[in-house]
Image (spheres, grey):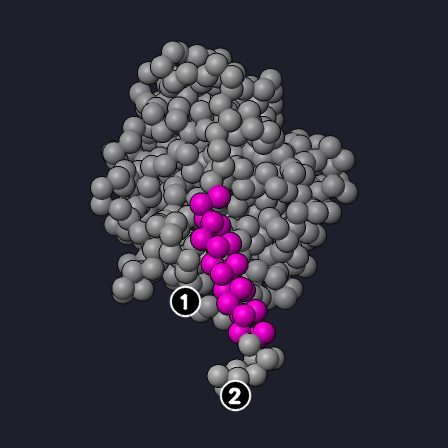
Amino acid sequence: MKKFFPRKKKILLIGVIIFVILFCTCFSNLSINSYKYNKPVGHEESTEEFLKFPDGFLWGAATASYQVEGGNKYSSWWEFEQEKGRIKNGDRTDVCVDHYNLYEEDFDLLKEMELNSYRFSLEWGRIEPEKGVFDDTEIVHYKNVLQALKERNITPMVTLWHHSIPTWFAEEGGWENKDSIKYFSAYVQYVAENLGDDTELWLTMNEPTAYISSGYLMGKWPPGEADIKKVPVLQKNLVKAHKVAFEIIHKYDSDAEVGIAEYSSYVVSDSNKNVIENIVAYSIDKSWTHYFVSRVKDELDYIGVHYYYRQKIRLGLLGDLISKDAEDFEETGLDREYYPRGLYEVLMRFDKYDLPIYITEIGVQDYHEVSRDVFIKEHAKEVYYAIQNGVDVRGFHYWALLDSFEWSEGYDAKFGLIAVDLDTLERTIKDESWEYAEIAKCNCVSTGN
Ligand code: IFM
C-alpha cells in the first residue's frame, strides 16, 4: 500500500476528496438558495388586505419603436422582415400599429388606465438614417412625444437602443465592429444634447443578452447567425458602449438616472439535487443573466429588470437543457412558464448590487392558461414582498402598452393592455387590463380575489 500511495500522494488524494465533497455540498445548495418570504407581520392570505406600495412608485407600460411605430425603413429589421420565412405569417411593419402618428391617442388610453409612466425607445435608424447624418425632424418628433407625456403628467423612461440597429451600422458589422462604440457615442451625444432636458430616466440598451442569443446563437433575428465565436466580442463592445453612453448622458443631463434593461428569467435547477444541474443553472445565471449588470455596475444608477418566466435546467439524456414539466407547467405563451414567485427570487438576486430597480418589462400574451389580470396581480404581490424584504424597487412597467410586432413571431403574440385592429388601427382597452388600472390607481394590490 505504502508503495502505491506514498505520503505526498496520500495527502493529495485526501485533499482532492475534501475538495470534491465541499464542491458538491456547495453546488448542491446553490440553486436551492431561494429566498425566504418575510411576509409583513399579521399578513394572512385568507383575509383581504391592501398591500401598499411606496409613494411615487411608477406603474407604467412599455413599447419599443420598431415594434409599434411602422415604416422604420432605415433599420436592419426592415430588410430582414422582407426575407421569406423570417417572420411568422410573413408579417410586416410598413404600418405596424402606427404609434408614430397615433401616440397622443395611445397616451390618452394610458392615462385612462391610471398609469403614470411610459417606457419607450428611440429608433436609431430614423434619427441617423445615414452614418453621421442626423435627421432633425425625427428628433423633433421624439421631443413632441416627450412633451405629450409631460402634458399628461406621465413619467417617461427612454431606451436609446432596443434591438433594431440602423442599416448602415449593420452593414459595417454592427456591434461586432470595434468602431461601434464610436458610432453609438455620436448618436447618444446627439440625442442627449437634444432631449437631455425632457427626461430623467434613461436606458442605454435593451436586453443585450437576448440580442446576442437571438441574433448570433439562434439566428432568429438579424443578422441571422449561429456563431458562438462572435459572442465575446459582442459582449465586450456592448459593455463599453453602455459605459460611454452613461458618461455622455450625465454630461448633458445632470439629473439623469441611467440604467440598462436586462432579460432576467429565474434560472433554477430542475431537481435541486443533481450537482451538475445545479452548477449549470448557477453558471447560466451568473455568466449570462448577470453578465452585463455585473460588468457595468459602477456605471449604473439603476437596474432595469425584465421578468417573464422561470427557466428550469435539466440535463436530459438527449442533452436537452430546458425542462418543461408536464404536470405543473402553466404556459403564458411562447413556451413561457407562469411562475410569479420567480419575480421575487430574481429581485432578491439583483439586490446584491445595492442599486434601485425598475421592472422595465413584465407581460403575458392573450389566449393562454393565465389571464392578464391574475398575472399582473400575482406578480405585483411578489414585488411588494421583495420591497418588504429590503429591495429598492421603484416601478413596474407592463409589456406592452399595445399589441405589437413581436419580432420573428409577428403579430400573433399579443402582449398588449390595448388591442389594435390591424386593418382599422382602432384601439380598445382589453377587459383584463382594468385590474392593472385598479392597482395603479390605489398604488396597492389587494390580496382578495
Ligand atoms: O417584445 C419583446 C421585447 O422587445 C423585449 N422583451 C421581451 C418582449 C416580449 O417577448
Which image quarter: residue 374?
top left
Left or right: 247 as drawn, with respect to 392: right
Callout count = 2
Between 170 and 354, the one lying in front of the other is 354
Image quadrant containing the C terminus: top left
- Residue at coordinates 49% horizontally, 61% vertically from top-left? 21
Asked whether the viewer can see residue 9, the reply is yes
Mark 2 CB near ligand 1 (8 Å cut)? no
- Residue at coordinates 48% horizontally, 83% vertically from top-left? 1
Horizontal and vertical percent position of residue 273: 38, 52
Q: Tell me the residue that label 2 is attached to.
A: 3
Farthest residue, direction bottom: 3
Left or right: 252 as drawn, with respect to 94: right
Three-letter amino acid code at the position of disc 2: Lys
Three-letter amino acid code at the position of disc 1: Ala
In the rendered structure, does residue 16 fall within the stretch colored magenta?
yes
